[in-house]
Amino acid sequence: NAGVTQNPKFQVLKTGQSMTLQCAQDMNHNSMYWYRQDPGMGLRLIYYSASEGTTDKGEVPNGYNVSRLNKREFSLRLESAAPSQTSVYFCASRSRSRGDTGELFFGEGSRLTVL
Amino acid sequence: AQKVTQAQTEISVVEKEDVTLDCVYETRDTTYYLFWYKQPPSGELVFLIRRNSFDEQNEISGRYSWNFQKSTSSFNFTITASQVVDSAVYFCALSGGGGTALIFGKGTTLSVSS
């Protein structure tokens, strides 16, 4: 009953280092998303993938890249981390069938600190 | 462009009080979906309700109720007889009919004291 799994849960980086946040879902969902959450800002969309093989920018894509590796996995990469990327990152997935759009299922979040 | 506004940043109530969390949205889509999520202090995001634009019926689930009014572009959430366990951040969200990503409001922090 895993749902959406994110790794790592916690990470501390130095400015300029790179890292990849991994996300996998086992619900056979087509769409996957990466959000970041900052105090007072709500959840802001970084990138999303409406289906396997496609990715699109969200509201705050600068400094990030994504890869939709297969239907299950959607990774988020920080090539050169900056202190402004200190945040909690959430991966989510969503089913879409017969024109209906369901709710987002979220992972537990990954807390990233950039020093 | 789509937008969700939760004007109440923080609300504090005493147990057993009723509380309403406001959500106002903007969209040009004729088909869209509205959502509420709860984020307790533990940090996970918990889905509460989804409503599509063609269904304006109000919904009640236990102590929770939702009032959807297209005329005022609002989707308000009421907790009746609040409890300490209701303390959380509550997010309202909107997505278009094409399965586009959810756009979230900035959230309302609800604190319920005993």
Image: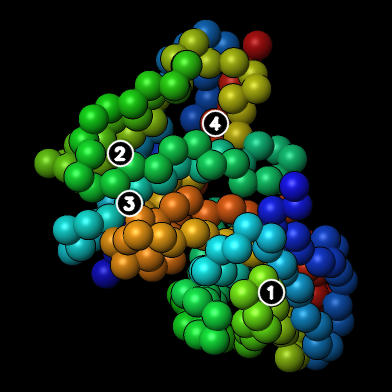
| Precedes in sequence: disc 2 or disc 3 | 3
Residue B95 x, y percent position in the rendering: 36, 59
Q: Quadrant of the N terminus of chain B?
A: bottom left
| Residue under pointer 4 | B110
Crowding at label 3, few (<14), some or many (≥20) Cα neighbours within 10 Å?
many
Q: For this view, does A44 lie left or right of residue B85?
A: left
**Which quadrant of the view contains residue B30?**
bottom left
**Which quadrant of the view contains residue A71?**
bottom right
Whether the residues at callouts 1 and 4 have beta carbons within 8 Å, the answer is no
- The residue located at (38%, 21%) in the rendering is B60
| Residue under pointer 3 | B33
Name the front one of labels 3 and 4. 3
Residue A106 x, y percent position in the rendering: 62, 54
| Residue under pointer 1 | A73
- The residue located at (68%, 63%) in the rendering is A25
| Precedes in sequence: disc 3 or disc 4 | 3
Tag 2: residue type? Answer: Phe
Crowding at label 4, few (<14), some or many (≥20) Cα neighbours within 10 Å?
many
Q: Is B26 drawn above or below residue B35 in the view shown?
A: below
